[in-house]
């Protein structure tokens, strides 16, 4: 129960931080592309009208993935309950694995929905449709870049969290040796609080990586598909950009 409470608190803080980081970094990055500085207050004022929609989107996508995986594993669960346990387990594993592949495919297709929602001021469903349109034909490229960003972010987070874990173990009463105790033991609130602080700091250092990569991917896909660079150049006041494409240079 203590572990679940601590994990729930960390998950809630992570969700709130994810929404805030995505909202602010989307605005900051889009302005930076134009070479225009923006303060945190200006970024928040620009992002605030879309924050509730962004919160709903960030909550909806994991629920969709979980529902797909559960649907894939449900036949195996039913067979295990009303028929053969071994057959049910095998069917559940296969169905869950196939559903997980589908869930990953969908999550990549919808991965650019957050910047679409923030920058184009669209609703949740329209931003998901917009993301699918931008990712179409570039799924593997988007998947590879986001996978690499996620791996880098997790490595950075792990480096930050490890010292807090050892400190938490030392303060929590079981000592550092307790981390390697396979027989279990009590997990105190001191351990949960200190390790939760470490997780929060690790997330604070990694959110800019993942959110920034997502926004830049969104801008890059729009440049490739919709010549967004011409609009950005005009917005930035660059004279004559894109007018010499027929000169043979």
Image (spheres, rainbow, N blue to C red):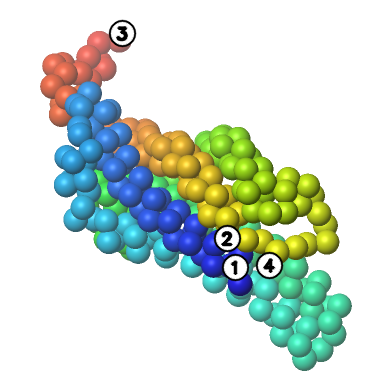
**Pick the front one: 199 or 109:** 199
Label 1: how many Cα within 10 Å (few below 14, some 14–19, many 20+): few
Query: Which of 164 and 151 lies nearest the eye of the viewer?
Result: 164
Q: Is residue 19 visible?
A: yes
Which of the marked residues, 3 or 4, is nearer the chain's N terminus?
A: 4
Quarter of the image holding residue 35? top left
Nearest the eye: 169 or 66:
169
Number of the label disc, if any, that sits on residue 189: 2
Label 3: few (<14), some (14–19) or many (≥20) C-alpha neighbours in 10 Å: few
Q: Residue 113, can we see it?
A: no
Image x and y of residue 198, in percent: 53, 45
Residues at marks 2 and 1, CA–CA distance in whole angstroms: 7 Å
Camera-nearest label, 3 or 2: 2
Label 1–label 4 contact, CB within 8 A: no
State how far apart marks 3 and 4 are (Cα). 54 Å
Q: Measured from the top left, where is residue 93 in percent x and y?
A: 75, 68
On screen, residue 222 above or below 183:
above
Assign a secondary structure to mark 3. loop
- Which of marks 4 and 1 precedes in the sequence? 1
The quarter of the picture where residue 190 lies is: bottom right
The numbered disc on residue 176 is: none
Assess disc 2: are there few (<14), some (14-19) or many (≥20) residues with their C-alpha within 10 Å of its C-alpha. Answer: some
Counting residues from the N terminus, which is met first, the one under dot 1 or under dot 3?
1
Disc sitting over residue 249 in the figure? 3
Which residue lies at the image location 44% right of the left edge and 46% below the top edge? 135
Q: CA distance from mark 1 to mark 4?
A: 29 Å
Residue matched to label 1:
2
Residue 84, position as x, y percentages in the image: 85, 85
Position of 220 with respect to 46 (left or right) is right
């Amino acid at each position: 129960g203590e572990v679940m409470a601590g994990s729930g608190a960390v998950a809630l803080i992570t969700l709130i931080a994810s929404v805030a980081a995505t909202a602010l970094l989307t605005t900051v990055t889009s302005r930076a592309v134009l070479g225009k500085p923006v303060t945190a207050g200006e970024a928040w004022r620009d992002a605030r009208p879309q924050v509730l929609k962004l919160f709903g989107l960030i909550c909806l996508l994991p629920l969709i993935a979980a529902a797909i995986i559960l649907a894939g594993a449900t036949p195996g669960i039913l067979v295990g309950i009303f028929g053969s346990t071994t057959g049910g387990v095998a069917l559940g594993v296969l169905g869950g694995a196939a559903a997980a592949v589908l869930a990953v495919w969908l999550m990549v297709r919808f991965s650019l929905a957050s910047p679409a929602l923030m920058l184009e001021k669209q609703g949740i469903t329209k931003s998901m449709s917009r993301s699918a349109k931008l990712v179409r034909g570039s799924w593997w490229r988007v998947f590879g870049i986001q996978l690499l960003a996620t791996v880098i972010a997790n490595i950075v987070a792990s480096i930050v969290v490890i010292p807090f874990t050892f400190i938490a173990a030392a303060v929590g009463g079981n000592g550092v040796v307790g981390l390697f105790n396979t027989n279990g033991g009590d997990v105190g609130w001191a351990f949960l609080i200190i390790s939760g602080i470490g997780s929060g700091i690790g997330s604070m250092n990694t959110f800019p990586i993942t959110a920034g990569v997502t926004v830049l991917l969104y801008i890059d896909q729009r440049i490739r598909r919709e010549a967004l660079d011409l609009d950005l150049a005009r917005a930035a006041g660059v004279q004559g950009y894109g007018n010499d494409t027929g000169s043979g240079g």
